[in-house]
Amino acid sequence: MLIVLLAGLGGAWWVWHAGRADGPYLIPGEGQRVVVEVQNATGIGGLARAVTGRLRERGIDVVSFGTADIDTLTTTILYLRRGDPGLAHRVRDALGLGEVIVEEDEKLLLDVSVYLGRDAADLVGLEP
């Protein structure tokens, strides 16, 4: 019985230890990763979901998407929430459109908030 207990404890320790990183954990937004949210600010159904797919195909880490409180935006706006402004420009390059505005908010735990305007509908073939 003691051998089984020791073997179980040893196995549990090995699984725990093997899963640990040797350095500090990566904080979202550090390194090459760009963490964004996508908000549909147009009232065009399915726009946030479609643009999320496009961004993910281009290596952008979209952690959430949904509908914004407004639905009348004509031009896509990318709000830099933290970090280097180059992060917002990477998202803009992946989209091919958008105006970058620095509006830092560390509490959001995001690099960029993307508020989709009607100009984004053409990217994914939706009717504006």
Image (cartoon, helix red, strand yellow):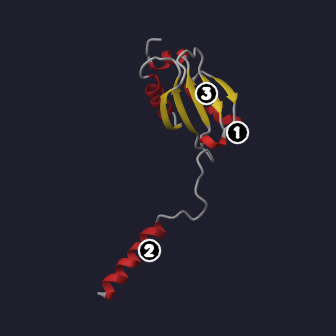
In which quadrant of the rendered view does residue 4 lie? bottom left
Q: For mark 2, what is the residue?
A: 13
- Outermost residue toward the bottom? 2
Question: Which structural element holds mark 2?
Answer: helix
The mark found on residue 92 in the picture is 3
Q: Rounded to the nearest whole Å, what is the CA distance between mark 3 and mark 2?
A: 45 Å
At x 55% / y 20%, what residue is drawn? 70
The image shows residue 16, relative to residue 54, as above or below, that is below
At x 54% / y 34%, what residue is drawn? 37
Residue 29 located left or right of residue 125: right
- Viewer-side label of 3, 2: 2
The three-letter code of the residue at mark 2 reads Trp
At x 43% / y 15%, what residue is drawn? 126
Q: For mark 1, what is the residue?
A: 84
The image shows residue 86, relative to residue 115, as above or below, that is below
Q: Residue 69: image x %, image y %?
A: 53, 24
Q: Residue 5: image x %, image y %?
A: 34, 82
First in sequence: mark 3 or mark 2?
Answer: 2
Residue 21 located left or right of residue 103: left
First in sequence: mark 3 or mark 1?
Answer: 1
The three-letter code of the residue at mark 1 reads Asp
